[in-house]
Image: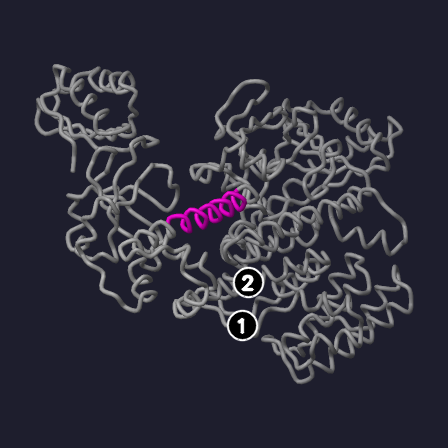
């Protein structure tokens, strides 16, 4: 076990003596605070914060992060307060410690909700200081190293959480050393047998390949030396988890994956990287389409390198990475390198660029957090955002935008600006119009076409990829639902009040105040939203307001008081799927909790028993001009021939109707039953369509399903 002296000896390499002394003082403070506490393994508890600080020392983190690592559990697990930490070690350290501490004082309904809320709290702290997450990653890494004493089910749960959240965060911040170990330990925790078998297979394969690897390495090094290039060739060990993933995703046998030999060439300058690439391509034959330039276009986490694939000696596949030594340091330490160069008091463009990218990512997380309805929704959005295989898209001005693989024009629009996303109606990719659901590919130029008054479509959620677009659309639709439900709620309340010749606008605030208090709502607006969503019944609110007056059930048949349906009411008025009402049908509304008004045909079986309850029903009538298309189900009895369905589909299109679905059931050898879901404007449009369908000789019967 490491001691505080070991840690301080390590810090002498990059921290001044006064800062090392502060770290030592923090250790003794933590030791006193955790006195008598033991870990599950039986070791003194202070061994854990010391190990976390040692991990951060290996990343050359600054003294404040090291102090926070030593104290990261004192607020959560001991009687020490945040104020006490601030008094002893300063406000910055106290904020870091508080950011890593869990929310222990709040009771949650489930463990998942508690974890999600703790993560949400940590993101807010990360926005102030990104070192919070670096301390948390080191904390998680040491916990993963010491999983051995826990129950198998607990091991699997913690490993899964690490693989889903913490390893991808380490990757997003470019801290490769932490990511690789977190992935390896998570793999071992989730699939111990697979890990063991794969490890044995790798050890065996490594022994068989030693001679060939040495030959290829020597050949590359000789060529670099002959050209006078200062490159150092090293063999690259393959990560067990990445091997396992390749086998699973590419459906390849172990031998096929393991047969690819990996090398890394480190040099001094970017110019040398490209010169070495030329030498490598002259030494071994490159594989077409397998070259990637991450120096010109770095990854989202700041990673820079040249990647190429070659065919080596005896047809052996080779993968080579070429980068500078500074890029190697950035690949391993990522955003942590910012503090390494800061400690040396030198600005470094690569480290500063990585830190700026990390801040931008955290800013995006913060936006998602503000839009999310709850912590579980937020963490699901974050998970989506953490697994990007990047593509690079050009704007019409030639700027490069980075998006996750399989992104669509809608994702691109929201990446440019939320308002562009909300208003997009079409797009051009390489000057050609494409659907908004099309998948984008690297190198394409994308132009978004917007229209004033356009708004997000609920259907977009079925094909978008980025968490930013998803959270922005959810947020917009929630706001839209609130606005529409308040408008509908006002109409319902005014309709109920009109029976007593009372106008809502003339009711005084003094009269409304007791009602709002009794209904447990903050304002009239909130009450109208609740009525519109069916969470409160307009008639019940009127009864309370007018001191429990009786509502006459005959009111339900009063056509003059009927609410008018225009077809543009939005999310709070929906059309029942059981009876498919269309303009021209007699209709009745059912007020459904959380959904607003569901419109039914007035002879729908679902309304039996509801009709007599004025609190659950609302009389409706269609407006003179109704917008939109409405779904109707038709049943056709038909002698099915090869081109019959094609002719029916053509006829439906000619009649300016839409075909939404087809289902065929064979009744006997000669007659089949065809169920069509068609989109029509109203009853007259439907009647004309049915009349035309009856003229097709193979159709013996056409009926509308009720």
Q: Which residue is mark 1?
A: 106
Q: Is residue 146 left or right of residue 609?
A: right
Query: Residue, x 77% and y 79% (percent of image)?
Result: 29
Q: Which quadrant of the structure image shows residue 272?
A: top right
How far from the left and from the top, in percent, is residue 283? 75, 24
Q: Is residue 227 left or right of residue 176?
A: right
How far from the left and from the top, in percent, is residue 6? 81, 69
Badge 2 density bin: few <14, some 14–19, many ≥20, Cα 10 Å:
many
Asked whether 15 or 621 is in front, the reply is 621
Query: Residue, x 50% and y 61% (percent of image)?
Result: 156
Q: Is residue 484 magenta?
A: yes
- What is the residue that sits farthest to the bottom in this orientation? 36
Q: Secondary structure at mark 2?
A: helix
Q: How many marks?
A: 2
Query: Residue, x 21% and y 29% (percent of image)?
Result: 683
Colour mapping: one colour
Q: Is residue 241 magenta?
A: no
Asked whether 271 or 376 is in front, the reply is 376
How far from the left and from the top, in percent, is residue 588? 22, 45
Asked whether 401 or 146 is in front, the reply is 401
Q: CA distance from mark 1 to mark 2?
A: 10 Å
Q: What residue range appears in magenta?
A: 470-488
Q: Which residue is mark 2?
A: 117
Q: Secondary structure at mark 1?
A: loop
Q: Main secondary structure of the magenta part?
A: helix
The answer to whether residue 215 is visible is no
Q: Which quadrant of the structure image shows residue 60?
A: bottom right
In the picture, the quarter occupied by the C terminus is top left
Q: Is residue 527 left or right of residue 324?
A: left
Q: Is residue 140 above or below residue 39?
A: above
How far from the left and from the top, in percent, is residue 406? 53, 34
């Amino acid at each position: 076990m490491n001691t505080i002296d070991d840690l301080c000896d390590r810090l002498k390499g990059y921290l001044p003596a006064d800062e090392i002394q502060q770290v030592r003082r923090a250790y003794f403070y933590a030791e006193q605070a955790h006195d008598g506490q033991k870990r599950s393994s039986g070791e003194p508890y202070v061994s854990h914060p010391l190990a976390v600080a040692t991990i951060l020392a290996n990343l050359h983190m600054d003294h404040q992060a090291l102090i926070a690592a030593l104290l990261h559990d004192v607020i959560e697990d001991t009687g020490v307060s945040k104020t006490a930490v601030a008094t002893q070690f300063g406000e910055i350290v106290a904020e870091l410690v508080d950011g890593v501490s869990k929310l222990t004082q709040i009771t949650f309904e489930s463990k998942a909700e508690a974890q999600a809320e703790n993560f949400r709290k940590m993101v807010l702290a990360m926005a102030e200081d990104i070192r919070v997450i670096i301390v948390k990653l080191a904390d998680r890494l040491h916990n993963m190293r010491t999983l051995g004493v826990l129950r198998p089910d607990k091991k699997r749960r913690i490993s899964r959480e690490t693989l889903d959240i913490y390893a991808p965060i380490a990757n997003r911040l470019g801290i490769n050393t932490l990511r690789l170990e977190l992935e390896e330990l998570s793999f071992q925790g989730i699939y111990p047998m697979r890990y063991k078998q794969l490890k044995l297979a790798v050890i065996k394969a490594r022994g068989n390949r030693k001679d060939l690897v040495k030959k290829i390495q020597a050949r590359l090094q000789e060529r670099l030396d002959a050209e006078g290039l200062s490159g150092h060739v090293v063999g690259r060990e393959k990560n067990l988890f990445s091997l396992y993933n390749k086998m699973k995703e590419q459906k390849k046998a172990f031998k096929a994956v393991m047969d690819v030999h990996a090398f890394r060439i480190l040099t001094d300058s970017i110019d040398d990287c490209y010169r070495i690439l030329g030498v490598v391509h002259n030494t071994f034959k490159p594989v077409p389409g397998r070259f990637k330039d991450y120096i010109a276009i770095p990854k989202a986490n700041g990673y820079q390198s040249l990647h190429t694939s070659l065919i080596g000696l005896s047809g052996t596949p080779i993968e080579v990475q070429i980068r500078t030594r500074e890029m190697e340091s950035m690949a391993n330490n990522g955003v942590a390198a910012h503090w390494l160069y800061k400690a040396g008091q030198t600005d470094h463009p690569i480290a500063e660029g990585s830190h700026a990218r990390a801040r931008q990512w955290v800013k995006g997380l913060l936006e998602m957090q503000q839009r999310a309805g709850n912590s579980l929704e937020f963490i699901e959005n974050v998970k989506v955002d953490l697994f990007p295989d990047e593509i690079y898209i050009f704007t019409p001005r030639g700027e490069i935008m980075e998006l996750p693989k399989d992104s669509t024009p809608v994702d691109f629009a929201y990446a440019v600006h939320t308002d562009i996303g909300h208003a997009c109606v079409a797009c051009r990719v390489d000057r050609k119009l494409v659907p908004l659901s099309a998948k984008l590919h690297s190198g394409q130029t994308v132009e978004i076409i917007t229209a004033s008054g356009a708004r997000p479509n609920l259907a977009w959620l079925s094909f978008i990829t980025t968490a930013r677009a998803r959270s922005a659309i959810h947020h917009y639709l929630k706001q839209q639902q609130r606005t529409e439900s308040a408008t509908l709620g006002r109409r319902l309340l005014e309709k109920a009040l009109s029976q007593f010749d009372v106008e809502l606008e003339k009711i005084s605030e003094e009269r409304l105040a007791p009602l709002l208090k009794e209904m447990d709502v903050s304002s009239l607006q909130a009450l109208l939203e609740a009525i519109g969503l069916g969470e409160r019944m307009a008639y019940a609110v009127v009864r309370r307001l007018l001191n429990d007056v009786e509502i006459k059930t005959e009111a339900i048949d009063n056509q003059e008081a009927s609410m008018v349906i225009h077809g543009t009411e939005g999310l709070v008025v929906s059309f029942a799927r059981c009876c498919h009402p269309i303009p021209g049908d007699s209709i009745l509304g059912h007020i459904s909790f959380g959904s607003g008004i569901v419109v039914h045909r007035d002879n729908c079986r679902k309304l039996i028993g509801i009709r007599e309850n004025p609190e659950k029903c609302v009389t409706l009538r269609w407006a003179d001009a109704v917008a939109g298309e409405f779904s109707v189900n038709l049943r056709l009895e038909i002698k099915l021939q090869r081109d019959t369905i094609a002719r029916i589909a053509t006829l439906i299109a000619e009649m300016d109707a839409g075909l939404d679905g087809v289902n065929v059931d064979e009744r006997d050898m000669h007659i089949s039953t065809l169920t069509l879901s068609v989109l029509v404007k109203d009853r007259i449009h439907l009647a004309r369509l049915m009349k035309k369908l009856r003229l097709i000789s193979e159709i013996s019967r056409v009926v509308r399903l009720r």
